[in-house]
Amino acid sequence: MRIMGLDFGSKTVGVAISDPLLLTAQGIEIIRRKSPGKLRQTLARIEQLAVEYEAGKIVLGFPKNMNNTQGERCEKTQEFREMLERRTGLEVILWDERLTTVAAQQIMKESGIRPAEQKEYVDSIAAGLILQGYLDLMNSKQDKDTD
């Protein structure tokens, strides 16, 4: 079993997948749509990727405000979560994604990706960071349980 990570935006969804040992996350795709409300094809593609990669769970970035409040994006993300659960039958875990886009941009800058090209990668890298944060927490809990 693998775990899928998603960075849900108004026009894109960054997708990442874990390795089979649940240690690392890799960005695999950015799903683009023409308007924010057009989610049917997005959901179908996520379902297809979940089957292809044998995902047993989804971690969905939850865009809280910096002061820990929830705004309109959080509401839309919760609605998307419900749609994902219905469509895939998988558990969808909300994961605090504050600063993941900033971290993704820093990674790209350090990697030498030109600012003009960063839009092509940011969502996929952010999805990887969301998923990696979840995997790291799960692995640290496992380590504590075995001590």
Image (tube, grey):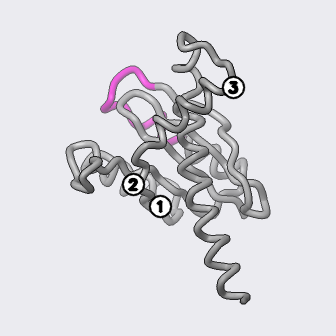
Question: Quadrant of the rendered structure where residue 78 is?
Answer: bottom left
Quadrant of the drawing holding the C terminus: bottom right
Q: Give the Cα distance between marks 1 and 2.
A: 6 Å
Q: Callout 3: few (<14), some (14-19), or many (20+) C-alpha neighbours within 10 Å?
A: few
**Magenta residue span:** 33-44
Secondary structure of residue under mark 2: helix
Percent from the top left, x then y, of residue 72? 21, 44
Q: Give the Cα distance between marks 3 and 1.
A: 31 Å
Q: Is residue 67 left or right of residue 108?
A: left
**Residue beneath the point at 23% across and 53% down:** 70
Q: Are marks 3 and 1 in contact (CB under 8 Å)?
A: no
Q: Are marks 1 and 2 in contact (CB under 8 Å)?
A: yes
Percent from the top left, x then y, of residue 20? 78, 60
Q: Is residue 2 magenta?
A: no
What residue is pinned by disc 3? 111
Q: Nearer the viewer, mark 3 or mark 1?
A: 3
* Label whose residue precedes the other's in the sequence (1 or 2): 2
Percent from the top left, x then y, of residue 122? 54, 29
What residue is pinned by disc 1? 92
Q: Are marks 3 and 2 in contact (CB under 8 Å)?
A: no
**Residue beneath the point at 61% across and 26% down:** 108
Viewer-nearest residue: 118 or 82 = 118
What residue is pinned by disc 2? 81
**Residue beneath the point at 55% across and 35% down:** 104
Q: Nearer the viewer, mark 3 or mark 2?
A: 3
The amino acid marked with disc number 1 is Val
The amino acid marked with disc number 3 is Ser
